[in-house]
Image: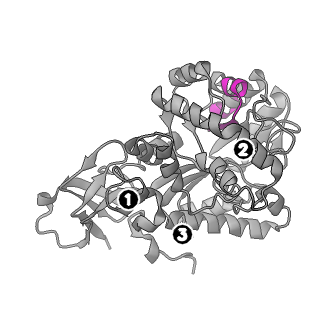
C-alpha cells in the first residue's frame, strides 16, 4: 500500500544553498515526489506533518567514522579485548545510534577484519535499522605505519596493488590508504609521509581501475601532495596543507574531510585516560588544522563532513557536533550544512541522497528553528524533532525487521 506524507508549514533547507519558504515536500513511500508551494497541495488527504517553527532538511551524512570503535579512551586497545561477535554488534549499535541522531548515511573508514561488512550488508538490505553505509574494509598502511595495528600492511607497488585487490574482493565500497603518520599510533610523526609517491599512485590507480573511490589519511604536507598527485578522491584530516596543496586540490577537485571532532574531543577529555602520546600530538597539530581548514575553505575547496566517530570520546550519535565545530572555525552555517548534506552525498556517489528535490530518497531531518541562523538547531541532537529514513519515521522502525 502506498503511503503519502506531506511536510508543510515551516522552512526547507534543500541541502545545497536554498532556504525555501511557503513550500511543502511530498513523499511517497521512500521517495520525495514533489517540492512545491503550499497552495499546490490544497485538498491533500494523506498524512500531514506540521513543520511550523521548524526546518526540514536532508538527513546528515558523515563521511568518516569507525563503526567498530566505541569512543573509549584507547579504542584500538579496547578492540583487543573483544571477540568478533561483540565487535560486530558494536558496529551495528553505533550505526543505529548515528541514525537516531540524524545521520542517515555514513562512510566507515577502516574496521577490524571486515567485521563491519556484514553489518553494512544487513543494514543496507533493510534487515536492521540503520543509515546507508559504505565501508573501506582494512586500511592499507606501510610496515610500522599509522594504522598498522589493524590495517593491511603492504610495502612496495606490487604489494599495495595486491592489498587494494584484497579490499575489493572482500567487498569494500572505497579504498583507504594511509599516506602519513597520525595522532593515534605510538611512535609515528603526523608530518611524515609514509608511502612514497609511487606507492600511493599505484594504489590509487588500481582502486580507480576497479571502479572504487579512494580516501587517504593524510596529515603531513608531502603525504598530502603524494595523494593528490596520485588522484585521490578525498583527503582525511589535511592538517598541514600548504599553498601548493591548496592549489593542487582545487585543480584536481579533491575533497577535504576535516574531522575536527577527533582532535576536539581528545583535547576536551585529555585527563580521562587517553594515552599521553595521543594528547601531546593532538596539542601539537590542533591549531595548524584550524588554519589549514580555513585556508582551504576560503580558497573555495570542496568540503564534506566527517567526524572520525569512534576515536576517544568522539561518540557515535554525537556526529552532528561537527557542524558546530565547522562554524566555530569560521565556516558559514550554509556551507557547514552543505558539507553535511550534498557535499557528503557527492563525495560518496550517492546521487539520490543529501538533497531535498523531486526523485531523491526521503532521508530527512526535521529540526527546531532555522539552522542557517543557529547551527545548533542541526548540530545538537536535542534540537532534532524527527528523523526519517527512506520515508519512515526512525522511532517507528523496528531495530530488526527479521522475523
Label 2, secondary structure: give it. Answer: helix
Q: Which residue is mark 2?
A: 282
Q: Which residue matches tag 1? A: 362
Res. 190 mark: none
Residue 363 shows in this picture? no
Q: Which residue is mark 3?
A: 129
Dot 2 or dot 3: first in sequence order is 3
Residue at the image point whose x is 32% and y is 60% from the top = 369
Q: Image check: 82 left or right of 245?
A: right
Q: Is residue 6 left or right of residue 353?
A: left
Task: Indicate which label's residue lies in the foreground, 1 or 2.
Answer: 2
Of callouts 1 and 2, which one flags the residue occurring earlier in the amino acid sequence?
Answer: 2
Does the magenta-highlighted stretch encompass residue 221?
yes
Q: Residues within 10 Å of mark 2 (few under 14, many from 20)?
A: many
What residue do we see at 67% from left, 60% from top?
A: 313
Residue 295 is at least partly visible in this image:
yes
The image quarter containing residue 141 is: top right
Q: CA distance from mark 2 to mark 3?
A: 35 Å
- Classify mark 3: residues with Cα within 10 Å, few (<14), some (14-19) or many (20+): many
Q: Residue at x 67, y 28 (%)?
A: 224
Q: Which range is magenta?
A: 206-225
Q: Position of residue 21 (x, y in %)?
A: 21, 53
Amino acid at each position: 500500500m502506498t503511503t503519502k506524507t506531506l511536510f508543510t508549514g515551516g522552512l526547507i533547507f534543500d541541502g545545497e544553498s536554498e532556504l525555501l519558504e511557503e513550500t511543502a515536500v511530498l513523499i511517497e513511500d521512500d521517495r520525495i515526489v514533489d517540492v512545491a508551494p503550499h497552495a499546490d497541495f490544497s485538498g491533500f488527504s494523506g498524512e500531514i506533518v506540521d513543520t511550523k517553527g521548524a526546518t526540514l532538511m536532508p538527513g546528515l551524512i558523515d563521511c568518516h567514522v569507525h563503526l567498530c570503535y566505541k569512543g573509549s579512551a584507547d579504542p584500538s586497545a579496547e578492540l583487543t579485548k573483544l571477540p568478533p561477535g561483540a565487535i560486530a554488534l558494536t558496529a551495528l549499535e553505533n550505526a543505529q545510534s548515528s541514525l537516531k541522531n540524524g545521520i542517515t548515511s555514513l562512510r566507515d573508514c577502516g574496521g577490524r577484519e571486515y567485521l563491519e561488512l556484514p553489518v553494512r550488508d544487513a543494514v543496507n538490505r533493510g534487515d536492521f535499522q540503520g543509515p546507508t553505509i559504505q565501508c573501506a574494509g582494512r586500511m592499507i598502511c606501510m610496515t610500522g605505519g599509522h594504522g598498522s595495528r589493524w590495517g593491511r600492511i603492504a610495502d612496495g607497488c606490487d604489494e599495495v596493488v595486491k592489498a587494494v585487490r584484497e579490499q575489493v574482493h572482500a567487498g569494500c565500497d572505497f579504498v583507504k590508504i594511509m599516506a602519513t603518520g597520525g595522532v593515534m599510533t605510538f611512535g609515528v610523526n603526523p608530518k611524515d609521509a609514509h608511502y612514497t609517491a609511487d606507492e600511493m599512485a599505484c594504489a590509487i590507480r588500481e582502486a580507480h581501475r576497479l571502479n572504487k573511490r579512494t580516501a587517504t589519511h593524510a596529515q603531513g604536507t608531502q603525504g598530502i601532495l603524494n595523494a593528490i598527485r596520485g588522484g585521490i578522491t578525498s583527503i582525511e584530516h589535511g592538517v598541514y596543507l600548504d599553498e601548493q596543496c591548496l592549489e593542487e586540490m582545487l585543480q584536481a577537485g579533491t575533497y577535504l574531510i576535516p574531522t575536527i571532532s577527533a582532535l576536539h574531543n581528545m583535547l576536551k577529555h585529555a585527563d580521562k585516560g587517553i594515552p599521553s602520546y595521543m594528547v601531546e600530538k593532538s596539542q601539537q597539530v590542533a591549531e595548524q588544522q584550524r588554519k589549514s581548514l580555513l585556508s582551504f575553505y576560503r580558497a573555495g575547496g570542496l568540503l564534506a563532513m566527517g567526524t572520525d566517530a569512534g576515536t576517544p570520546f568522539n561518540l557515535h550519535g554525537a556526529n552532528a557536533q561537527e557542524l558546530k565545530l565547522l562554524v566555530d572555525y569560521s565556516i558559514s552555517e550554509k556551507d557547514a550544512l552543505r558539507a553535511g548534506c550534498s557535499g557528503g552525498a557527492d563525495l560518496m556517489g550517492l546521487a539520490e541522497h543529501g538533497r531535498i528535490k523531486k526523485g531523491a530518497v526521503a532521508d530527512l531531518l526535521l529540526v527546531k528553528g532555522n539552522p542557517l541562523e543557529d547551527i545548533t538547531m542541526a548540530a545538537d541532537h536535542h534540537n532534532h524533532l524527527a528523523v526519517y529514513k527512506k520515508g519512515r519515521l526512525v522511532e517507528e522502525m523496528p531495530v530488526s525487521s527479521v522475523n
